[in-house]
Image (cartoon, coloured by chain):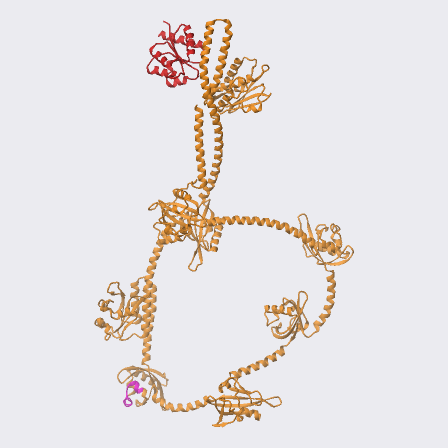
Chain colours: A red, B orange
Amino acid sequence: MSKKILIIDDDKEFCEELAECIREEGFYVECATDPLQGQKLILSGDYDAIILDYKMPELSGADLLKKMRTLKVKGNVFILSGRPFVEKVFEEEGLLDLIGGFFAKPVDMGSLLEKIRNAASRKHDK
Amino acid sequence: MEAPRNLLKENEELKNRLKEAEELLAAIKSGSVDAFVTDEQKVFTLKGADYAYRILIDTMIEGAATLALDMTVTYCNRSLVKMFGKPSEKIVGYSFLGLFLPENRDKVKSLLRKGVNQEEFLLKKNRKTPLPVLISSSPLKLENAGYCLVLTDLSEIKKAQEELQKSHDELERKVFERTRELSQSEKKFRLAFENSQDAILWADVKTGILVAANNAAVALFEMQKDKLIGSHFSALHPREAIAKAKEAFQMQALGKEPLEEVPIITRTGKIKTAQISSSVVHLEKMTIIQGVFRDITRQKELDGMIKEIADKYSTLFDTTSDGILIHDLKGEILEVNDAYCRMSGYSRKELTHMPMSKLETIETGRQIFRHIKRVADSKHERFESRHRRKDGSVYDVDITCLYLEREGGLIAMFMRDITDRKKSERDIFEARQRLQTLMEATPVGISFTDDATCQSIKGNAAFLSQFEAGPRDNISASAPDENAKGRKVRYFIDGREIAGQQLPLQRAIKENRVIPPVELEILLPSGKRWFSMVSAAPINDAQGRVLSGVAVTIDVTERKKSEKALEDAERKYRELVKYAPAGIYEIDLRKKRFISVNDAMLQMLGFSREELVGLDPLSILDPESQEHFQKRIKQWLKGEEPDKLVEYKMRAKDGHYLDAALEVSFTTNGSSKPLSATIVCHDVTEQKKAEKKLKQLNRTLKAMSDSNQAMMRAEDELKYLEEICKIIVQDCGHFMVWVGFIGTDEAKAVRPVAQAGFEENYLKTVNIALETERGLGPTGMAIRSRRPYICKNILTDPNFAPWREEALKRGYASSIALPLISANKVLGAINIYSREADPFSEQEVQLLSELSDDMAYGITAIRLRIEHAKAEDALAASRDLLQSIIDNTPHLIYILDLERRFLIANKAVAETVGVRPEELIGKRREEVMPPEFARNHDANDQQVIKKRSPMQFEEQADFKGRTTTFLSSKFPLFDSRKRIYAVAGISSDITDRKKAEDSLKEDKELFEKMVQERTRELFEAQIELERAKRLSDIGVLAATVAHELRNPLAAISMAAHNIKRKAKNPELESHLVNIDKKIAESDQIINNLLFYSRLKPPHYEKVDIFNLLEESIAAMEEKRKKDVPVMRNFETLKGVFIEADPLQIKEVFNNILNNAYDAVPQEKGQITVTSEDETDLVNISFKDNGEGIREELLEKVFDPFFTTKAKGVGLGLSVCRQIINFHNGYIRIESGPGKGTNVIVKLPKKKDV
């Protein structure tokens, strides 16, 4: 079974392009442009990696991670952000253990795909 | 967003601080806040002070008040009342604040709150003129807490300061005037020099060359001024006089007296005589001799003429027999001739220059002077005077004075000795005078006629009185004028009337001979008849002719009368013996019988003549006298002469004895044996009694004197009274004495308090009380009547009845009660008892009264003395209290006598001076403070004494090495005769206040400076803030834009990635690469925007600055790939670590290098990085050879969004400056068109620096 990846970003075009890139690598990709929908997906499905936009309307990436933390949902999350230095925000909230890495927009696809591959294989090793 | 908020907050704080500072400053300026604090001092209170203290407080010039805690006035003194111009009842009980205008009340409140403190106020309320005062406040801690205030009037000091300013102005004005006067006097001098009538020449003392000459000199020497100046002084004199002139010049130069008259020569050769007075004048550059020449040629000629005349005159002068004397208007003799010398006995030399007053004997010096003036006015006068010769004798002179208009006026006196004439004149006058006196004084009547007709007769006083006539009455001795009524005088000789022609005077004239005395009986018109002896004589002229006549009339009436009286006396003598008041008797000593006895003697003894004649004369004498009589007889027989006078006691018929003084004359029978004696006997019983009385009085007097002494000694009233009683008993010899005082009880009992003599419990029985029936006795009477009551005989005086029995038991026969009256109040009475009846003579009563008065006085005196002692104790206590009160005030209170010795000084004075208080008393002021200060204080005291009223001063003195400033109120103290005997002072130490004022002033200046600083800072902060706000707005926008841009950028890049992957078409490849490139560029722009917006205080680390710089350069070279190598010249930075944020610093380097690369030309571009390692900082400069920046743009390069480039947002240098500022570093750009650009960055090595 191919690895399951979830992308949550309010930019629909971005989601489509990224999803296609990742699918090309042989992953099963689901997209959510609505963070609330994304939240539902996180809680219902078991994803090998979650790619999460930092800034979204209604619910931010940090809010989602907090929810995961309270519901004790495990996940391997990668944060995407147009703004640098967002690590601090997650560090302050104590959410770093849920996060596999940070990526600034525009995203360097090479390093992102590599991280995702690593994360998915690690999960399957377990 | 953090940074701007901080800035806003900081700005808010700054504003608040500034506001506070402004408020404080305003408060200090308005005086409502005190900028100084004093230590708590001692507390004093008015409570417990006695009256004397209040008096002191009331009379001191300082206003004083105590306040309760709520500021209600509880006490105020008179000065305070005066200061506020409100009655004290309107002050006490009301709030102290009410005395001030509302705007001053807070100031008063703050003064009171501060404890011991002082502050100046201007009192305006209820006053016409504002009064500056210093209010000193100290908290009252005794009893009820409150405040104690002392208000010192400062108006005098303020006035004095104004005066000082005034006098300073005056001084300046004077200096100005002096300067002006000086320049004027110089002008005046020049004018005087040029216009002097006398020729003035100046010659150099060294060379003798003339250096200056005035117009008169030009005229005198007939030479041009320029010719005169420069020639030698010797050229002024004729040849023969040159030597003399030179000598004179030398003498003057040596400071000796110069020649006075010298001949001079003019240019035209005229010889003149000049009088020269010269003097040495020291000028600034040389010493000169100033010669003043006066042409006296003409004068000389005149002198010659005068001399000729004078010679002629002096011949006359010396040969005349009249004395001639010439003196000046002051009376100084100038010349005399030989005749006067002979006259006066002086030599001419002695007389010359002698003052006239030495010669003149009648007029005093001042009168002479006036006389001279008179002569000078009238030009001529003749008078007589008396002059004194050299030998002291005085002689008369006849003087003729002439005023001569010469040499300021002279008087010439021509004198003739008229002593002889005067003497005879005087002799005649004296003789006439003597005669006149004799005539007037003699009791002998003298009458004379004017001529030989006897028509008019005049007489002396005695004559006029003899004839009962006035001086104008004509006692005509011619035939009685029948018509002249009442003036008819009739003359009788031996009872026979004679006519006027027969009277002696008429006869003497008629017969021209002396008529010897004739006895006349004269009947005056008044009816008076008298006897007179009259003689008369004619007065003849040289030829023996009768001119007039004189008669002498002697009143012999008295003589006539006494002749008759003698006759009567002989007749009366016979009766005298018989009726003489003295007893006279004759005794036969052998037969021891009375021979004769007169009526007075019989009366004295009470015998009839028959009875007495039958008695032995011895038997009428008492035994003692008989013995004495026998003794005297024996003495007589021995041939001695016993005293003629003797006193015996004689017994009268009724048995009483009388004292008799006998005068005994013994008659002898030719042998030595006495036969009989004639005795004159006087009864001297009364006299004896008087003597005895006198003796008693003397004793009383002694008692008085003793009692007075007792009073002086007495300390205790009762002891004193006891002593007086004893004295009366001992000195006066009275039997018993007691003193009783009136009680204060209802019955007014007279309580015995002292007693002496034989009493035997008598006083226990007396029980006298004024308001009872036993108050009507002698004591009661004396007290009520305030007069002595004398009970002559206790046996018979009905008033004495209640006490009679007890009195008689003890042998009292009589008594006297005397009231004791002091200050018009009856204290009681003194009772004196005697064993004799009626022993108190009037005089003794008088003396006893005085004694009792003395006693009353003594009692009062003793009581007063005790009161006085008590008062003194109270006074001492009060003084102690006062001292302790004044000792507890923080003010210095002291009194100095006129010798400047301390009479009183409080503890504050002693503490200030640094000695014990008791050491201070009696010390002089200069012994306790340095003399220069003491002198100043003394001068202030003198002002007070002169002004006789209070004054205030600011005084200073060094004590214990510290200069203390005082505000002193001083006032004179007057004795009962209004003379000043001391000066009192109250001084407050205002040193701290002064200092505080000074430091306050400094603080004020400091505050003002601070405020200026703050304002500037604030201004800068506002600019900064504005900039920051602008930046932060941009930042927010940039961040938003950047973030939003990145999302589409991300999508684009992702899409490009997918295209590349899917298309695999090499033709598309280059387009996709371009897209990637532009995405990267866009990303950098966004980065810068974000960096700028994200700027915050650096995250400091230790940074190897060399590596950091090298990395940045390498990255940039790689990135730009231009053919422009960067010249590295920063070896000095190797191994240097600085504290900085590496990311931020790297951003700085990137931006600068980026700019440099943009600026350099495509070819031959050059970038050089140079460093200098300084002690505390690193200095890095980036220089390029670009086209440079125009000057007007240079100042804008750091502004955000300023750019000259086609691309870029213009944030690079803004970011740089922001970062460098965060690091407390420095960034600067040096550039100009064509010069390239040099960016210099300085960074501190440590973040704190």
Locate residue B791 relative to residue B1231 in the image: left or right: left
Locate residue B672 relative to residue B1140 in the image: left or right: left
Locate residue B72 relative to residue B1054 in the image: left or right: left
Q: Position of residue B83 (x, y in %)?
A: 42, 50
Q: Position of residue B1209 (x, y in %)?
A: 51, 19
Q: Nearer the viewer, residue B376 or A25?
A: A25
Question: Which residue is pictured at 61% across the width and 68% down the height?
Answer: B369
Q: Is residue B612 magenta?
A: yes
B828 vs B1232: above or below: below
Locate residue B695 relative to residue B1011 in the image: left or right: left
The residue segment tinted magenta is B601-615
Quadrant showing the N terminus of chain B: top left
Q: Is residue B1128 visible?
A: no
Q: Nearer the viewer, residue A55 or B914?
A: A55
Q: Nearer the viewer, residue B142 or B247?
A: B142
Q: Position of residue B1226 (x, y in %)?
A: 51, 24
Main SS class of the magenta portion in the image: helix
B792 vs B1236: above or below: below
Indicate the quadrant where residue B271 lies: bottom right
